[in-house]
Image (cartoon, helix red, strand yellow):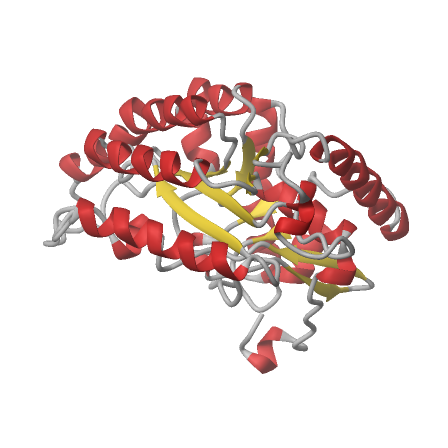
Amino acid sequence: MSTPADQTSGINRRQAVLTAAAAGLAIASNGVGGQGTLLGATLPRSEFRSRDKTFWPGGARLAISLSLMFEGGGQPEFGAGGVIAEKIAEGVPDFPTNAFFAYGYNEGIPRLLDLMDKHRIKLTSFMIGKAVERSPETAREIVRRGHEAAAHGRTWENSYQLSRDEEKRFIADSVESIKRITGQNPVGWNAYWMRSSAHIYETLHDLGFLYTIDRPSRDEPFIIPVRGGELVTVPYTFQLNDIVSFPFEGWNPAAYEQALKDEFDQLYEEGVHRRRMMVVSLHDRISGHAGRVRVLDRFLEYARSKPGVWFARKDEIARFALARRDDTPVLDSGPASKSGVR
């Protein structure tokens, strides 16, 4: 079975990761961490923390990471969640809901990519394999503009009820599609609604992944030991996830903008003393609408006006966490099948 697994030994893999991270940090000291954008890096580091404590590249005070979920075209033909609350009869194509998903690759993603260019920000796009195959030019454009392509499954459906081998194939299939179409090998994983099987860490390790985001339990990255190696968690978000907190029904743009600013201000304040990370989740068919992009534009302008803010892709954050492991929590909660916590 073809997989994206790294063929080197665990030791060599770790050395390669640390070497890459060190190279990225050397760049970061000049104001940019890999593809990430560091604002205010020229300010004295002592303004943020003591000289022997650097939580982010260049002495940055807060990392901000944006996720773009590329799902349009990967949804089931009927039964997919959308704007219309009433479920359609089984077996009947849900034309308006499918059109709602198509808005993501027709309008949403192009608009969001232009916004990222405007603010010189690189994000991580979690891609459904079938969606990438449906809109290959969109997937290639995301990567061409310097954003990270990460894996989100073969289709927009859960995998936790699959057998261990079937789930592994479900993940590997999406990786193969993304790599074949974009030329980039995904190293990050996000499951449908963050729900994977109890074997997911071992599976991701076997497939050569660097990180997952499916454990929203902290405001900073952490390391999970697995099979003599390790996997980084770059935590996802519920509270700033557009599909959860800010649906179309009851949409309040002013409240959303204030929620973004309040989250930023609190984490920015805490970032003086400890490593803090802010995550914003964007879905192609939700945040890509014109009015929502305008709100996001105002927030990004606000965040970029503050010194010491690092806008980073999730692969950059994961590599930095490994390179600065003295400042990174290592959490071993035991087998997920017993603890229920990963």
Quarter of the image where the C terminus is located: bottom right
Quarter of the image where the N terminus is located: top right
Q: Residue at x 68, y 46 (%)?
A: 45
Is residue 53 depicted above or below 92 in this figure?
A: below
Q: Residue at x 52, y 62 (%)?
A: 270
From where the camera sits, is residue 210 visible? Answer: no
Q: Residue at x 58, y 44 (%)?
A: 314
Which residue ends up furthest to the bottom in the rendered image? 338
Q: Position of residue 106 (x, y in %)?
A: 29, 22
Locate residue 325: give its quadrant: bottom right
Q: Position of residue 123 (x, y in %)?
A: 50, 35
Q: Is residue 286 left or right of residue 94?
A: right
Q: Nearer the viewer, residue 58 or 199?
A: 58
Q: Position of residue 263 (x, y in %)?
A: 39, 56
Q: Position of residue 266 (x, y in %)?
A: 43, 60
Is residue 225 depicted above or below 131 in this figure?
A: below
Q: Nearer the viewer, residue 334 or 28?
A: 28
Locate residue 115: give its quadrant: top left
Is residue 75 depicted above or below 111 in this figure?
A: below
Q: How many marks on residues?
A: 0
From where the camera sits, is residue 110 visible? Answer: yes
Q: Is residue 95 left or right of residue 132?
A: left
